[in-house]
Image (spheres, grey):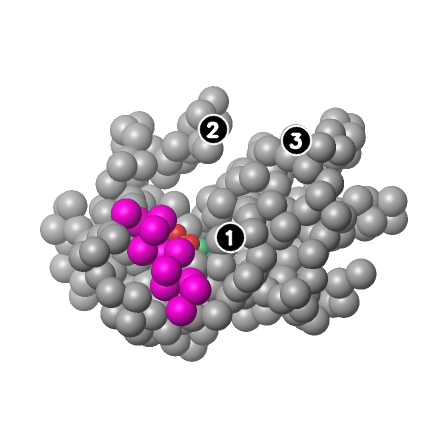
């Protein structure tokens, strides 16, 4: 079994539970948090875990990305924090839950295509340091959980700040080089950005994310840590499912 706060040995393989058909009983309300830095496979894993367990999936990074896209597209000066915050509040960011994965909307317009662009990725760490925006996002995330009480939520502060009482918390980590390769792949940047450059960007983002005063990237004390460096997505999800099944009996 995985120890609290201990990384899964990279050589460990888990029995394939993919075909078990296990889902969280529909009467059960539950929140599962997945924290960790960029490029650990968090988003993919969170979405697939939610699908497998029959839960809703919340991508909180999309909310900060949406704020960064608003900053750029509305040509708001970075120094004008008040203007940025009020514009983001006015955008009424929300998700369309009829889509899989849910799409994010600002001013009732889907902006999914926009939030993965490279210029947004470059600005988002800065945006995510703004305390007024963070508290707004955390408030929204708690409202979303009230409306979707069977949820897998993924981000950097979900288990530590947004949902400290979550009964099941995971923290995903991976080697920076592996994370860089995955990030290039995910953002479709093959050829235009080197692995070295992306590693540097990732380490810089980690530095910003983990040293900010508000909601820094930390591993929650009671999280199950999984090192995804050499595990496939399926292996990670199988391990998570195993932990969920084990914990569910006590909830
Ligand atoms: O997971 P991602 O790359 O889509 O996240 C984008 C940015 O948002 C990243 O710089 C960290 C930040 N973020 C955050 O600070 N808190 C969250 N809950 C989710 C993302």
The crowd level at tag 1 (other Cα within 10 Å; few <14, some 14-19, many 20+) is: many
Task: Measure how far apart labels 1 and 3 are at the Cα level.
Answer: 18 Å
The image quadrant of residue 208 is bottom left
Ligand 1 appears in which quadrant? bottom left
Using residue 217 as the reference point, say whether residue 146 is left or right of it: right
Residue picked out by circle 1: 42
Task: Specify whether tag 1 is near ligand 1 (CB below 8 Å).
Answer: yes
Residues in magenta, as a range: 177-188
Q: Is residue 66 above or below residue 230?
A: above
Q: What residue is at 59 percent from the left and 65 percent from the top?
A: 227
Q: 129 or 12, which is in the foreground?
A: 12
Residue that label 2 marks:
100
Which of marks 3 and 1 precedes in the sequence? 1
What quarter of the picture does the N terminus occupy? bottom right
Secondary structure, mark 1, is helix
Q: Count all numbered tags in the image, as a single digit.
A: 3
Q: Are marks 2 and 3 in contact (CB under 8 Å)?
A: no
Label 2, residues with CA under 10 Å away: few <14, some 14-19, many ≥20? few
Side (left or right) of 162 relative to 12: left
- The residue that label 3 is drawn on is 54
Q: Residue 76's spot in the image, x, y percent?
A: 15, 54
Q: Look at the picture and state if 97 lies above or below 29.
A: above
Q: Secondary structure at mark 2?
A: loop
For residue 110, say whether it is visible: yes
Within the image, what quadrant is residue 2 found in?
bottom right
């Amino acid at each position: 079994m995985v120890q609290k706060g201990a990384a899964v040995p990279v050589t460990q393989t888990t029995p394939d539970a993919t075909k078990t058909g296990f889902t969280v009983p529909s009467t059960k309300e539950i929140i599962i948090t997945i924290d960790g830095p960029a490029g650990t496979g968090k988003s993919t894993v969170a979405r697939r875990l939610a699908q497998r367990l029959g839960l809703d999936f919340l991508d909180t990074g999309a909310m900060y990305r949406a704020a960064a896209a608003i900053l750029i597209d509305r040509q708001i000066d970075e120094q004008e924090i008040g203007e940025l915050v009020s514009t983001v509040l006015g955008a009424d960011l929300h998700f369309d839950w009829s889509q899989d994965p849910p799409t994010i909307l600002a001013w009732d317009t889907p902006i999914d295509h926009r939030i993965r662009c490279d210029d947004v990725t470059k600005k988002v760490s800065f945006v995510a340091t703004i305390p007024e925006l963070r508290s707004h996002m955390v408030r929204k995330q708690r409202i979303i959980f009230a409306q979707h009480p069977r949820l897998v939520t993924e981000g950097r502060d979900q288990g530590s700040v947004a949902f400290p009482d979550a009964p099941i918390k995971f923290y995903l980590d991976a080697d920076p080089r592996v994370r860089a390769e995955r990030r290039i792949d995910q953002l479709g940047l093959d050829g235009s950005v080197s692995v070295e450059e992306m590693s540097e960007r990732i380490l810089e983002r980690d530095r910003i994310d983990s040293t900010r005063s508000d909601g820094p990237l930390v591993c929650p004390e009671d999280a199950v840590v999984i090192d995804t460096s050499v595990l496939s997505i399926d292996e990670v999800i199988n391990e998570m499912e195993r932990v969920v099944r084990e914990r569910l009996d006590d909830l």
